[in-house]
């Protein structure tokens, strides 16, 4: 190893030196490092010499990417029909393969992979909470096979993808975490769209990678059905179980051994293999040189097969493991507890052994077919081997080994798991908090929620750590649409904050988050009270005060308190500028634009919203750009330019869908529906509105539920169906308590529907409610409803009311309302 390293360092462009180091690293059990050096060498000669590696070195690279050679393997029998069925299904869609451990799922996938060009990867149970672990493996294998695959990607997608794959050459750029995550997901889906992807052990895949797989059209997925958490769409699975009689007869040319296997085992490939392995090791049976069928070499073979089968495959594995004692046994135990591939150096450190001794022991274990060398290091030869070893471990030994692994683990989630196994739940809880926060930064919300929940469930977290865990889970739940769960976590986190002045900034932060949660989805007045408490707790602490001011200004804006909203926004902006928080400053500018819009200055508001959207888009904060871009489109509709408004709302909707942002989708769909109604396309408007409603109800988002019902009502009005429109507007009103703009709109539109139906007495209180509620933006519709009711009643005040409504609309630039108002004059 030292010679190869020195040679490659001295002559980095010489292929012989590069090949020597790649082989040395692979022999040392560090396939990941071997692959990484090959990639560095490939890029270096491409950049400096314009050359590719030789066919020999490229072939070595392909072998390293493939499955590791095994010491004992049966011929693949009895599954030909399933392979054919899988290949037929894979030609057009998703194939699912289900079976308990030992039924031969991996061998079936290998047969499929041999028959069709594909990308193959297996999930590991220890990596199930590590965001992108499976997806990263897939993408690296894709780029190893085709180094130019990412070249056609747009610059933004390549830049985002380089965050996941640092070795990728990409333009410089930065994105906020949510935008970066969405762009990585989109880039990965584009790279995998035209490829067949094969995944083993899906039950252990991390949720972020499962999201990626959901967008891959041609998939073969194998899993244990009793452990599967992430359901994937597709036809009924191909179920693997016992090998058929014909398969056993093809494999074993000895009736006595076949009868023993049939009578004493479940006839799964793993059970059959364990019986034959013991017979072979004891010299009682061997495969024939010609056809490879197994034949007895001693009269006692059938009786021994019955004995092994009766004791069970797990017992047979345990007996093979017991042969190995001392440091070799420790290595097996460490691999079982790790649950993932590990380089030789990591295992040597954990076992407290020299590297050469570790390699020698691993070589012996590989000969015994208890461990295999994979792409990233060593692992047990089968998951069942790890399960048997772990089940046999004494509690004290298990805790001691977990403690060793915790001290060398690089990943916080691994540290947490091992500290928990070591019997130190307090240290585990702290590591879970770190892991959950890191997952949030990668927008791996499912992983973050699970990690934080496990940390909370330890019951041993210190108060401050418990508060961090609850805040992390609250953020993950909010982004996943579980508003009620997020609120519960934040309330619990508030109780966990220390009392007194020292805990005030932390309490202010939680109160501000609670206020923001309630302002968007539930109750503005309760949100306003929480925001005031946040400001009191924040005091003069800039880091705590600016977010509280930001939330409070938005709430004031929605409660029609423009002066205080502007004052608080200005103070927050000043703090953000002083502390160098550019994203915070951009959010304030966005809020100010929204304030101008809501307070009736529609033309000014549209111009400011357009500018805010451009600012977010140019800074890479595409998630934040969705709301101002969509609202800008809505404003253009009100300005009498529905075609322009439709273009903006479609741009926002496209971004929200690309980013996987359900709240943004519901918001943009409502606005696009209104644009389509304004253009006279009620059927398309109704489709959008119903999709918005479906998303909003799934998210339990009361505000977007109210606006979706409004959009449904407008579509029915456009289709000249006032009865259906009235029903929709009343549903919108029912969801608009303490959401003043939406309540104003719903009451005004319901009143207009009543007027159209001739139910004037029913319209009167609705008009009164509309006029008494909501910010200036909503009062255009309220004044229109009052004018329509007065005209229908032949009220002497009707001309004055119509004239006032027209003047107000004209002064605000709300030309969308003018045709209906002019018709009343």
Image (cartoon, rainbow, N blue to C red):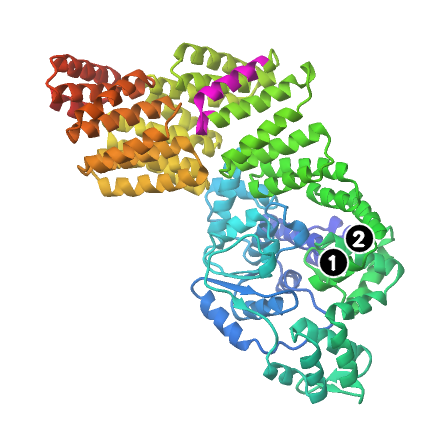
Q: Quadrant of the N terminus?
A: bottom right
At x 81%, y 86%, the residue is 300
When the figure is inspected, residue 581 is found, relative to residue 574, above or below; the finding is below
Classify 10 Å Cα crowding around label 1: few (below 14), some (14-19), many (20 and above). many
Left or right: 51 in relation to 638: right
Q: Are marks 1 and 2 in contact (CB under 8 Å)?
A: yes
Query: Bounds of the magenta span?
Result: 519-536
Task: Return the x and y of residue 678 as percentages of the image width and height.
Answer: 22, 33
Q: What residue sits right under mark 1 in the picture?
A: 378
Task: Return the x and y of residue 127 as percentages of the image width and height.
Answer: 65, 50
Numbered circle sitting on residue 347: 2
Left or right: 301 in relation to 817: right
Residues 496 and 224: in front is 496
- Marks 1 and 2, Cα distance to the nearest angstrom? 9 Å
Residues 116 and 822: in front is 822
- Disc 2 on helix, strand or loop? helix
At x 63%, y 18%, the residue is 505
Please check the rendered image and state whether residue 532 is part of the magenta-colored stretch, yes or no: yes
Answer with the quarter of the image where residue 715 lies. Answer: top left
Does the image show residue 536?
A: yes
Does the image show residue 159?
A: no
When the figure is inspected, residue 181 is found, relative to residue 111, above or below; the finding is above
The majority secondary structure of the magenta stretch comes to: helix
Label whose residue precedes the other's in the sequence (1 or 2) = 2
């Amino acid at each position: 190893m030292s010679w190869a390293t020195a040679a490659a360092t001295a002559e980095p462009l010489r292929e012989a030196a590069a090949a020597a180091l790649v082989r040395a690293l692979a022999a040392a059990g560090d396939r990941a490092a071997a692959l990484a050096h090959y990639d560095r060498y490939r890029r270096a000669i491409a950049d400096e010499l314009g050359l590719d590696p030789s066919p020999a070195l490229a072939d070595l690279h392909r072998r390293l990417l493939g499955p590791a050679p095994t010491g004992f393997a049966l011929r693949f029998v009895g599954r030909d029909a399933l392979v054919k069925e899988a290949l037929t299904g894979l030609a057009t869609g998703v194939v699912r393969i289900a079976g308990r451990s030992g039924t031969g799922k991996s061998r079936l996938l290998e047969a499929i992979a041999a028959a069709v060009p594909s990308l193959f990867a297996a999930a590991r149970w220890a990596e199930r909470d590590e965001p992108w672990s499976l997806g990263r493996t897939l993408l690296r294998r894709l780029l190893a096979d085709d180094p130019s695959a990412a070249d056609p990607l747009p610059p933004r997608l390549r830049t985002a993808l380089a965050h996941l794959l640092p070795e990728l050459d990409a333009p410089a750029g930065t994105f906020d975490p949510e935008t970066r995550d969405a762009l990585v997901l989109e880039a990965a889906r584009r790279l995998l769209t035209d490829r067949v992807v094969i995944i083993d052990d899906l039950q252990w895949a991390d949720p972020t990678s499962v999201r990626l797989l959901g967008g891959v059209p041609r998939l073969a997925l194998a899993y244990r059905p009793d452990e599967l958490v992430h359901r994937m769409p597709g036809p009924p699975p191909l179920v693997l179980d016992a090998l058929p009689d014909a398969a056993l007869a093809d494999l074993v040319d000895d009736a006595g051994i076949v009868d023993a296997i049939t009578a004493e085992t479940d006839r799964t490939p793993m059970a059959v293999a364990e019986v034959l392995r013991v017979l072979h090791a004891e010299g009682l049976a061997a495969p024939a040189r010609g056809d490879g069928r197994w034949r007895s070499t001693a009269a006692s073979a059938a009786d021994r097969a019955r004995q092994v089968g009766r004791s069970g495959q797990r017992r047979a594995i345990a007996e093979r493991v017991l042969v190995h004692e001392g440091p070799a046994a420790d290595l097996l135990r460490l691999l079982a507890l790790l649950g993932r591939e590990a380089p030789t150096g990591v295992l040597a450190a954990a076992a407290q052994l020299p590297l050469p001794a570790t390699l020698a022991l691993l070589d012996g274990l590989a000969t015994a077919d208890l461990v295999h060398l994979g792409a990233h290091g060593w692992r047990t030869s089968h998951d069942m081997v790890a399960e048997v070893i772990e089940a046999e471990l004494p509690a004290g030994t298990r805790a001691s080994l977990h403690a060793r692994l915790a001290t060398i683990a690089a990943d916080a989630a691994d540290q947490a798991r091992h500290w928990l196994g070591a019997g130190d739940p307090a240290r585990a809880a702290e590591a879970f908090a770190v892991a959950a926060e890191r997952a949030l930064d990668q927008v791996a919300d499912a992983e973050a929620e699970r990690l934080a929940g496990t940390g909370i469930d330890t019951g041993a977290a210190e108060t401050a750590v418990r508060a961090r865990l609850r805040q992390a889970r609250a953020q993950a739940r909010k982004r996943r649409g579980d508003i009620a769960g997020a609120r519960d976590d934040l309330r619990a986190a508030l109780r966990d904050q220390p009392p007194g002045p020292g805990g005030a900034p932390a309490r202010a932060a939680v109160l501000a988050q609670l206020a923001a949660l309630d302002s968007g989805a539930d109750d503005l007045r309760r949100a306003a009270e929480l925001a005031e408490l946040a400001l009191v707790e924040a005091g003069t602490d800039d880091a705590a005060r600016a977010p509280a001011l930001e939330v409070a200004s938005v709430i004031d804006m929605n409660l029609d308190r423009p002066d205080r909203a502007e004052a608080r926004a200005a103070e927050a902006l000043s703090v953000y500028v002083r502390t160098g928080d550019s994203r915070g400053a951009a959010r304030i500018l966005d809020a100010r634009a929204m304030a101008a819009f809501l307070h009736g200055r529609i033309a000014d508001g549209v111009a400011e919203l357009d500018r805010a959207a451009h600012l977010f888009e140019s800074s890479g904060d595409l998630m934040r750009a969705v709301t101002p871009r969509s609202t800008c489109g809505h404003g253009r509709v009100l300005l009498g330019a529905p075609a322009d408004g439709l273009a903006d709302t479609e741009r926002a909707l496209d971004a929200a869908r690309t980013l996987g942002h359900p709240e943004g989708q519901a918001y943009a769909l409502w606005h696009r529906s209104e644009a389509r109604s304004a253009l006279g396309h009620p059927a398309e408007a109704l489709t959008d509105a119903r999709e918005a409603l479906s998303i909003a109800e799934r998210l339990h988002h009361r505000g977007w539920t109210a606006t979706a019902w409004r959009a449904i009502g407008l579509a029915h009005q456009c289709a000249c169906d006032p009865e259906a429109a009235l029903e929709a507007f009343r549903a919108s009103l029912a969801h608009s308590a303490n959401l003043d703009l939406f309540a104003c709109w719903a009451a005004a539109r319901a009143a207009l529907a009543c007027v159209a139906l001739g139910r004037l007495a029913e319209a009167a209180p609705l008009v009164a409610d509309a006029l008494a509620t909501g910010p200036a933006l909503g009062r255009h519709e309220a004044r229109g409803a009052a004018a329509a009711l007065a005209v229908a009643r032949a009220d002497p005040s009707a001309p004055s009311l119509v004239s006032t409504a027209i003047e107000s609309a004209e002064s605000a630039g709300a030309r969308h309302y003018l045709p209906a108002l002019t018709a009343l004059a």
